[in-house]
Image (cartoon, rainbow, N blue to C red):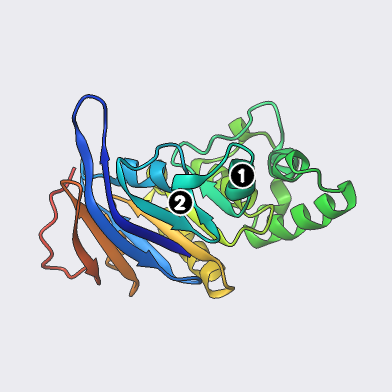
C-alpha cells in the first residue's frame, strides 16, 4: 500500500526534514506515526499526499509511483485516499449532509448514490440527527466526525488522519480513534499522525516514531519509550 524507499527531503533553505526514511505499510494495516514538533511528521504527510516530492529516494502509494506522477494522474491518485485534518476544514455555508455529499459531487456521482452513501455514513458516525446542522452548530467532536464521514464518502482504500484529535477533548479523542479502528477492521488502511503519545499507548497497534527526520523506532510504543514531547 505505502512504501518509502530511502527518502530524504531537503527544503530550499537547507533544512533536512526527513533523512533516508524507508518504511512499508501493508494494505489493511493501522499505523500511528508519532513524534515531537520538528520530527518530520508534516513533511511525511506532504510527501504522502504528493504536496511535496522527495529530494532523493522514491515513494509508492497503491499503484502510483509518486516521483513520476503526471498532472493528469494526481486527481486519480488522491481519489484512492480520504484525508482527515486537525482543523476539520468543513464548508461553513453547507450543512452536514452537503459537506459529506460535496466530496462525491466533485467526482460526478449520481444524486441517488450520494443519498444512499451519505445516509450510511451519517449512521456510521452517529450524526443522523445533525443532518441539516451547519458546522458552527456542532461541537468539535461532531465536526471531526463529519470530516471523517466526508473522507469516507468515495470509499477510499486509505485514510490519512493528520492530528485528528488535536482540537477535541480526551473522551471524544478516544471515541474517534475507536471509530478509526472499526474502519480499519472493515478493511481500510489507516495512517494516523499524532503527537498524542498517551492516547497511542491505549492501543496495540504499530507505531512509527519520527525523531529529527529519522525513523527512531518502528513497532509498539512502550511506556519507557523516550520521546521528546511538544
Residue that appears at 18% across and 29% down? 14
Q: Nearer the viewer, residue 49 or 94?
A: 49
Q: Spatial distance from mark 2 to mark 1, Cα to Cα?
A: 22 Å
Residue that appears at 10% across and 59% down? 226
Q: Can you tell which quarter of the image residue 134 is in? A: top right
Q: Can you tell which quarter of the image residue 75 is in? A: top right
Residue that appears at 53% across and 47% down? 83
Question: Can residue 171 be seen in this snapshot?
Answer: no
- Is 130 placed left or right of 160 in the picture? right
- Among the two numbered marks 2 and 1 on one chain, the one whose residue lies closer to the N terminus: 1
Foreground mark, 2 or 1? Answer: 1
- Percent x, y of residue 212: 15, 46
Q: Which residue is mark 1?
A: 73
Give the number of the disc on residue 211: none
Mark 2: give few (<14), some (14-19) or many (20+) Cα within 10 Å: many
The residue lying furthest to the right in this view is: 112
- Percent x, y of residue 154: 69, 53
Q: Nearer the viewer, residue 147 or 76?
A: 76
- Percent x, y of residue 70: 57, 40
- Is 115 placed left or right of 218 in the picture? right
Q: Which residue is mark 2?
A: 161
Mark 1: secondary structure = helix
Amino acid at each position: 500500500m505505502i512504501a518509502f524507499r530511502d527518502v530524504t527531503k531537503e527544503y530550499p533553505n537547507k533544512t533536512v526534514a526527513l533523512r533516508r526514511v524507508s518504511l512499508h505499510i501493508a494494505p489493511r494495516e493501522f499505523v500511528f506515526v508519532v513524534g515531537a514538533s520538528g520530527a518530520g511528521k508534516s513533511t511525511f504527510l506532504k510527501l504522502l499526499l504528493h504536496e511535496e516530492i522527495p529530494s532523493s529516494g522514491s515513494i509508492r502509494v497503491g499503484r502510483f509511483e509518486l516521483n513520476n506522477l503526471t498532472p493528469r494522474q494526481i486527481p486519480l491518485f488522491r481519489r484512492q485516499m480520504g484525508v482527515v485534518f486537525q482543523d476539520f476544514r468543513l464548508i461553513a455555508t453547507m450543512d452536514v449532509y452537503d459537506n459529506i455529499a460535496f466530496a462525491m459531487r466533485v467526482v460526478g456521482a449520481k444524486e441517488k448514490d450520494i443519498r444512499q452513501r451519505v445516509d450510511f455514513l451519517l449512521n456510521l458516525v452517529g450524526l443522523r440527527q445533525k443532518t441539516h446542522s451547519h458546522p458552527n452548530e456542532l461541537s468539535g467532536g461532531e465536526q471531526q466526525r463529519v470530516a471523517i464521514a466526508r473522507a469516507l464518502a468515495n470509499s477510499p482504500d486509505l485514510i490519512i488522519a493528520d492530528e485528528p484529535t488535536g482540537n477535541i477533548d480526551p473522551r471524544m479523542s478516544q471515541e474517534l480513534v475507536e471509530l478509526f479502528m472499526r474502519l480499519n477492521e472493515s478493511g481500510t488502511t489507516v495512517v494516523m499522525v499524532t503527537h498524542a503519545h498517551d492516547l497511542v499507548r491505549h492501543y496495540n497497534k504499530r507505531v512509527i516514531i519520527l525523531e529529527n527526520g529519522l525513523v527512531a523506532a518502528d513497532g509498539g510504543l512502550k511506556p519507557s519509550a523516550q520521546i521528546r514531547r511538544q
